[in-house]
Image (spheres, rainbow, N blue to C red):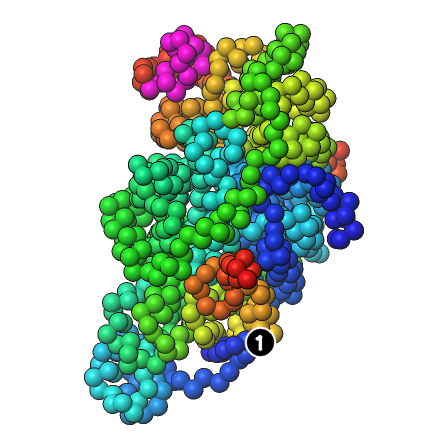
Amino acid sequence: MTAVDLRVAQRPNAPLTTYRYDEYDAAFVRERVAEFREQVRRRLSGALTEEEFRPFRLMNGLYLQLHAYMLRVAIPYGTLTARQMRRLADIADKWDKGYGHFTTRQNLQYNWPKLVDTPDILEALADVEMHAIQTSGNCIRNVTADHFAGVAPDEIEDPRPTAEFLRQWSSLHPEFSFLPRKFKIAVTGAEHDRAAIMVHDIGLRIVRNAAGETGYQVVVGGGLGRSPFVGKVVGDFVPRHDLLAFLEAIMRVYNRFGRRDNKYKARIKILVHEKGIDDIRADVEAEFAAMDRSVFAHDPEEFERVAGFFAPPPYETLPRDSQMLRAAKLETPAFANFADVNVSAHKIPGYAIVTVSLKPIGGVPGDATSDQMRVLADASERFGFGELRVSHEQNIILPHVKQDDLFALWLMLDAAGLATANAGLVSDIIACPGMDYCSLATARSIPIAQAISKRFADMSRQRRIGKLGIKISGCINACGHHHVGAIGILGLEKKGQESYQITLGGDPTFSASIGEILGPGVTSEQVPDVIEHLVDFYLAEREEGEAFIDTWRRIGHARFKDALRREGEDGADI
Amino acid sequence: MALISDGSFIEDDWRRLAEEEALPKAGKVIVSLARLQHALEVLGTESTLGVIVPNTTELSALIEALPRLELVSISFPAFSDGRGFSLARLLRRAGFRGELRASGRLVADQYSHAVGCGFDKIEIPDELAERQGEEQWRAALNAYAMSYQRGYPGRGSILEARRRAARP
Amino acid sequence: MANFKHPQILIASNLTDGEVVFLGASGWERDHRRARVALNAEEAAALEASGKRDISANRVVDVYLADVEIGGDGAPTPMHYRERMRVKGPSVRLDLGKQAASGGAP
């Protein structure tokens, strides 16, 4: 492995951009690989039965799916370097089938690895300071964060040092690795929630109190799945000093009292729902008071060490607006569309945040070929300090691109089929793998996303419609976040056929809401028609500047239901 | 049952009393939680007493008896049921210094979790011990040099090591 | 056994590589057309017993019976869309999975 490692060595002057392992981190991850290699060997020898092996392979991201094993690689808080992206591409070529799937939890999945190859894959990941630790299993999962962290103009503090702290704290936790069910934590430090913290087991929002101290608003018991809930505030202001102790207290309460009699009622959201947030808060506070908090007290030096890795790259001093960008937009309308739709404001003058859509019209949402991954790595090095992000919308972000470079970047992306100008639009659809890959699925998701995307292939129509989040899950577990889609689609089985239930009014942000069911399920062929009718009705009803969710909230669910029923009576095929 | 201590299978010098079995006058015996109160009242100081408890036991049910207990064994109804780990932490936090056993179908890969939560012995069925021999338990115990957590016994803490390195 | 309604085949995943396999006349087959078909409850039980033995032998995992219909050529085709997906591969990537080996034909 060392020989391969040299080939992808970090360029000497590259900025840090993300956490780099020290000797302890490196040793830990190597030990984890060695442990897993042994676990695989013991599984093959029969020392471990499948039942015994399963939780341990899951805690290393390895699933058994419909056609093959699936390996979910952690991309902590969605940040990765060009070097890491190249390694992901190399692994796809060497051990998989030349592509990967970026997920709603900012991870990457390989759909075809062999069990016997996974230790070598993990070794190859460890070479570039990556792993698959706790991307599955009933443990604290890979911690996610705002994909615009560190560059968003609306940010109080970069959430990634906190997320990295939590990654370390939760890695192979002695006490909290055999929880009633999986446990997901998301962190944001911005005024706008791009990390969906209200629908996580724990959501952390970095806040400042009146005295100017930094702390966390702690939200608990959110989640999607069979019983969706918006999280509730368990700690309004937890000082940084107490964060780990407070989280330990929550985890201990959950580990002891979370239900274990029914897998569908085992998430902390059910405990919070059944006991009530006031009781849970009392339990957590009692546990917090009883523990030796000094052990978990904030360590400012260690926090500074971690935060140092996320220091801003060496930006140039630039004018706020780029003349080159303006000129290029006038000259090339296709680029202008890209710049208007996929480029977001950056906190530094003259820079921009670029969303590279992994949702080409008719494509598989979130999939990237190994060649595309290499193009993204190259693009990040040429135009963005070698840093990339994965968003929970299953897109790739280049977080620091000079506005002057946007046109050159666009040319490069366009040549690789990566310049679809649909970020946030109706064809920027979140979809889980569904029954094309997943053994839990009850119906396919990807073909539904493809059909909707093709129906709205006209990009000028998409821009007229504006921001609209469609989210598709292929089963009730809701990996496609359908509950919080402005339009959500859930694939179910009805009498041996795939059937799709549509919901409206979901919202994943601080104003979180769970979508309401529109009516009886429809067939896969009917879905694009229904979506089109809903969108047309919204366009007819919307007021100036109103997003779909706002119109829906203003005029109400019933109006949308009525509109769809009228369409049906008028002879449409729904 | 097989008993594991420090990565080795050892002889068990404790005896678990069946429910119908009379309390002996001497020796190291483990009783059920239901019989604990009675045993404490009847047995003199020449007997060494341990108790086996469900993993759902509240600390309050044991706290008074703790000073007289030499052993607490926590049952694991399934190896994937992690409640016993938290109960072990609570017992150690309450000052229990006697032997703490995890009893059930734990697999070797959980050994360092158990040690980290304060267990010092693992008790597994013989049939499981046949598949997962001593060398697997020893390997599991030594799989990691250090851990990220602080305040958990067993391995050294990475955070502590960094602190020491930062403040020579 | 009272709920035996259709012919059945035994489907599983190969332990070492995860590929979908079917119990055939002499061991596990990667092509479902070579699967042994149970025509009654007793034969289905015999398939399951073989499957259990091979779970214990650490050859296969996730073993279960799937209802099939028998085509004109005598080959079994799963009745449920989930298992039909498993004998082919992803419907969105006809170049991958078992269907790829057979030239993408259904």
Residue type at mark 1: give it: Glu
x and y, in percent, of residue A341 in the image? 55, 17
Of A435 and A569, nearer the camera is A435
A155 in relation to B93, above or below: above
Q: Residue at x 59, y 49 (%)?
A: A132
Q: Which residue is drawn at 58% across and 65% down?
A: B145
From the image, give the main secondary structure of the stretch colored magenta. helix
Q: What stretch is highlighted in magenta?
A: A535-553
> Can you tell which quarter of the image residue B88 is in?
bottom left
> Can you tell which quarter of the image residue A116 is in?
bottom right
Label 1 resides on the chain identified as B
Of B3 and A407, nearer the camera is A407
- Residue A54 visible in this rendered orientation of the protein: no
Asked whether A275 falls inside the magenta stretch, the response is no
Horizontal side of A363 relative to A431 (left or right) equals: right
Horizontal side of B163 relative to A534 (left or right) equals: right
Horizontal side of A99 relative to A437 (left or right) equals: right
x and y, in percent, of residue A166 in the image? 47, 49
> Can you tell which quarter of the image residue A388 is in?
top right
- Residue B157 visible in this rendered orientation of the protein: yes
Q: Quadrant of the C terminus of chain B?
A: bottom right
Q: Which residue is drawn at 59% across and 58% down?
A: A24
A474 in relation to C64, above or below: above
x and y, in percent, of residue A438 in the image? 56, 41
Residue that mark 1 sits on = B134
B107 in relation to A525, above or below: below
Asked whether A544 falls inside the magenta stretch, the response is yes
Q: Residue at x 58, y 73 (%)?
A: B138
